[in-house]
Image (cartoon, grey):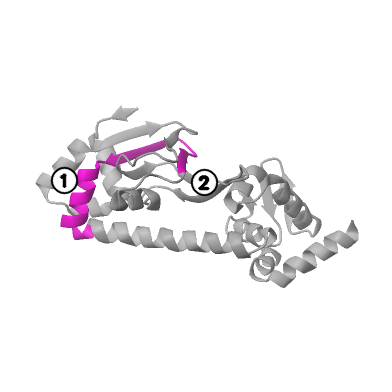
């Protein structure tokens, strides 16, 4: 649903993207008159592989998942975009006049503002705070994508899974399928690895929830390829 940029929405957008607050009054008024506010239900597509970029998306609330479908049909989650963050693919498409080579979907209900390309170009050219913030976010996302490529290419699933389980606190509420998408692995592979971790007493598996029992052991697996081999060998001997 497209809605006008009402005062409350504008205030929350400025809170999430403070670089817009420094615009001189005529340009700020133009931005808020021309941007489009979208309110999308969970599961709604934001863009698809091959689409042209319709503008610069700025998430006000909710989260958008950016992913690619691998040749074997599995989905690999590249990154999420939440309030105050940017979509590196959207930025790249706008700067390079290219089309999307991935797809974006709403993980939750999402409210976002879509900045038209002419205004995006003008802000990049004329407003240093916006340009600096945008390129800082772009750089941070690019680093994460390089790390993801390295992990998928060179780290075993058990290592990547252990790393993904850390930092969530005592419990992680997610499904095996969603974890598999984030790791670029099959659900079956992730389920087997989780069962191995549970057998070691490192995690506790429930319906839609993974309890973190021994985070130190998971950290050791995430950091050390040799520990992955040891875990696999012990699980094989018990079998």
Q: Residues within 10 Å of mark 1 (few under 14, many from 20)?
A: few
Residue at horizontal 22%, vertical 55%? 124
Q: Is residue 175 visible?
A: no
Describe residue 17's horizontal placement relative to residue 235 as left or right: left
Q: How crowded is mark 2: few (under 14 residues within 10 Å), some or many (20 or more)?
A: some
Residue at horizontal 57%, vertical 59%? 167
Where residue 18 appears, x then y in whole percent?
Answer: 26, 53
For the residue pair 182 and 53, the one nearer the viewer reads as 53
Describe residue 151's horizontal placement relative to residue 198 as left or right: left
**Any magenta on residue 4?**
no
Residue at horizontal 38%, vertical 53%? 88
What are the residue bounds of the magenta stretch? 103-129
State the residue lying farthest toward the left.
26
Quadrant that contains the C terminus: bottom right
Quadrant that contains the N terminus: top left
Location of mark 1 (residue): 28
Location of mark 2 (residue): 68
Q: Nearer the viewer, mark 1 or mark 2?
A: 2
State the residue lying farthest toward the top.
1
Real-space CA distance between mark 1 and mark 2, rounded to the nearest whole angstrom: 35 Å
Q: Is residue 115 visible?
A: yes
Image: 63 above or below 6 = below
When asked about the image quadrant of residue 69, the answer is: top right
- SS at mark 2? strand
When asked about the image quadrant of residue 159, the answer is: bottom right
When asked about the image quadrant of residue 222, the answer is: bottom right
Where residue 207 appears, x then y in whole percent?
Answer: 70, 40
**Any magenta on residue 106?**
yes
Where residue 130 appears, x then y in whole percent?
Answer: 24, 56
State the residue lying farthest toward the right.
238
Where residue 114 appears, x then y in whole percent?
Answer: 30, 40
């Amino acid at each position: 649903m497209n809605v006008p940029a009402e005062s409350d929405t504008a205030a929350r957008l400025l809170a999430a993207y403070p670089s817009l607050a420094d615009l001189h009054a005529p340009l700020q008024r133009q931005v808020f008159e021309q941007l489009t506010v979208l309110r999308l239900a969970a599961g709604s597509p934001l863009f698809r592989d091959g689409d042209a970029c319709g503008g610069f998306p700025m998430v006000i609330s909710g989260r958008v998942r950016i992913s690619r479908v691998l040749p074997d049909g599995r989905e690999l989650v590249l990154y999420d975009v939440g309030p105050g963050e940017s979509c590196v693919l959207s930025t790249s498409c706008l700067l390079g006049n290219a089309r999307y080579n991935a797809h974006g979907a709403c993980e939750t209900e999402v409210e976002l503002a879509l900045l038209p390309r002419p205004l995006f170009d003008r802000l990049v050219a004329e407003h240093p705070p916006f340009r600096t913030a945008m390129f800082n976010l772009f750089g941070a996302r690019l680093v994460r994508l390089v790390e993801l490529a390295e992990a998928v290419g060179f780290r075993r699933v058990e290592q990547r899974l252990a790393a993904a389980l850390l930092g969530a606190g005592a419990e992680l509420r997610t499904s095996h399928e969603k974890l598999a998408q984030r790791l670029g692995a099959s659900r079956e592979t992730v389920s087997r690895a989780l069962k191995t971790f549970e057998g070691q007493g490192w995690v506790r598996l429930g319906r839609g929830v993974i309890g973190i029992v021994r985070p130190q052991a998971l950290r050791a697996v995430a950091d050390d390829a040799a520990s992955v081999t040891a875990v696999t060998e012990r699980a094989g001997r018990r079998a």
